[in-house]
Image (spheres, rainbow, N blue to C red):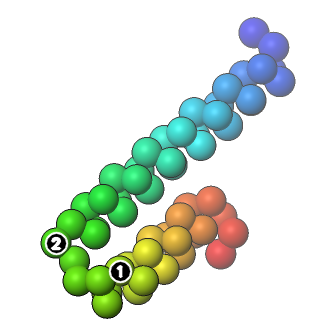
Amino acid sequence: MDPLLLTAASALCTLLILAAATVLIVRSALTDTDSKDRARILGAVAEVVRALRGRR
């Protein structure tokens, strides 16, 4: 298999897994949460995603 194709497929799978994990984290964090706390929760989730992607 072509190494470039394998690298692209690996990057795509990683991105899909990260996106799915982010959606699940946000959904579970925002369930039964007051509206005043949602901005703080979303900011924390964004910081975790940045750390997972290696930009922090």
The residue pinned by badge 1 equals: 38
At numbered mark 1, what does the secondary structure look like: helix, strand or loop? helix
* The quadrant where residue 33 appears: bottom left
Graded by Cα atoms within 10 Å as few (under 14), some (14 to 19) or many (20 or more), the crowding at tag 1 reads some
- Above or below: residue 37 compared with residue 48: below
51 relative position to 20: left or right: right
Say left or right for 12 vs 44. right
Which percent across, then down, holds residue 19? Answer: 50, 48
Q: Quadrant of residue 31?
A: bottom left
Query: In this orientation, does residue 44 appear?
Result: no
Amino acid at the residue labelled 2: Asp
Q: Residue furthest top?
A: 1
Q: Residue at x 44, y 56 (%)?
A: 22
Q: Would you identify the image quadrant in which residue 5 lies? A: top right
Question: Residue reaching furthest front?
Answer: 35
Residue drawn at x 41%, y 86% as measured from the top left: 40
* Residue with the mark numbered 2: 32
Mark before the other along the chain sequence, 1 or 2: 2
Give the position of the N terminus as an image quadrant. Answer: top right
Q: Is residue 32 left or right of residue 16?
A: left
Residue 21 position in % (x across, y down): 41, 50
Is residue 34 left or right of 13 when viewed as pictured?
A: left
The residue closer to the viewer here, 18 or 32, is: 32
* Secondary structure found at label 2: loop
Q: Position of residue 35 (x, y in %)?
A: 29, 83
